Amino acid sequence: EIYTLSLHDALPICQNRFSSSGLKDIFRKLAYSRTIRRLEVTRNEGYFDQSVATELTRLFEVNTSLRYCNFYMTPIDSFFTADTLHGLSQNRSLTELDIGYTSFGANKVTELGWALARNRNISILRMEKSQIGIDGLTLLSEAIFDSPGAIEARAKAKLVRELNAQEINEELRPRGCSLEIVNLSQHSSQVETPRQVLALERLVSLSQSLVELNLSRCSLGVLAGDALGRGLKGHKTLLRLLVSGNQLDEHGIKKMCKGLNENS
């Protein structure tokens, strides 16, 4: 969608030094706006307390017009809490989220994956260099699609006992996503163990709406090339894959090209 932007539907509040009270008030007022479509809180400085998280959660839960939300280069670790990500999962208007160059952190990647699985409106996710840790790709993939290990563990548990509340919640949680453009570049990601290789393969192969995937400068090695190759086999939507600045080496490139060769 292309919108003719005005002061009523776009709010660029970039390169400022908001206090917690200032940012909190902005989020509170926007929560009940029926015209705001674009919110840009980029390149802001400062530390924000729990009150900002509370109002951002409300904004995600209540607002029905917001389409684009950009927190590029803003320290969001203090106000993107588990509750905020749960609020994101309930939103029914947002289609694009940019949390690139932030201190998002590795401890919230799983909750982000759950939000993406619950919220099928989000089609664009940009989170380059957002400090998701060496297992970030694995945790994101397993949160969106579940892990074979967790599935097997629940199946075995059912044979001898009833599932506990957490296991039931895991089993009933929505799976999959509607992501079309994903930027996960500039992370030092580890893809070495069978679990990590399978997670990367599934992140590609099971994201059947995916059009563009950016894994540039992610420290990916030979096994990642193999995982990408298997994920690319028969993929019907992916048009653009960026893997520059990695260490796939000759064997990894061959494995990836084998997958491309089997993709028409």
Image: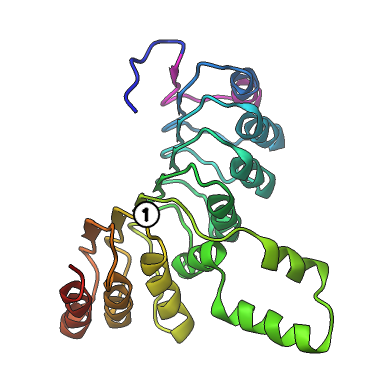
Position of 123 compared to 161: left or right? left
Q: Which of these two is toward me, 189 or 18? A: 189
Which element type, helix, strand or loop, lies under badge 1? loop
Q: Which of these two is toward me, 197 or 119? A: 119
Residue 117 % position (x, y): 55, 54
Q: Is residue 11 magenta?
A: yes
Quadrant in which the N terminus appears: top left
Is residue 188 something that shows in the picture?
A: no
Residue at the (22%, 56%) spot, across then down: 240
Residue at the (30%, 61%) spot, across then down: 215
Residue 103 % position (x, y): 50, 49
Q: Amino acid at mark 1?
A: Ser
Q: Looking at the image, which residue sits at the far top?
A: 7
Q: Which of these two is toward me, 131 or 149? A: 149
Quadrant in which the C terminus appears: bottom left
The residue under label 1 is 209
Q: Which of these two is toward me, 156 or 19? A: 156
Above or below — where is 194 with respect to 184?
below
Position of 165 compared to 2: left or right? right
Residue 218 % position (x, y): 32, 65
Residue at the (38%, 61%) spot, across then down: 187
Above or below — where is 180 with respect to 58?
below
Residue range of the region highlighted in magenta in the rendering = 9-24
Q: Which of the 4 image quadrants contains residue 80? A: top right
Is residue 168 something that shows in the picture?
A: yes
Q: Is residue 139 magenta?
A: no
Above or below — where is 152 with respect to 35?
below
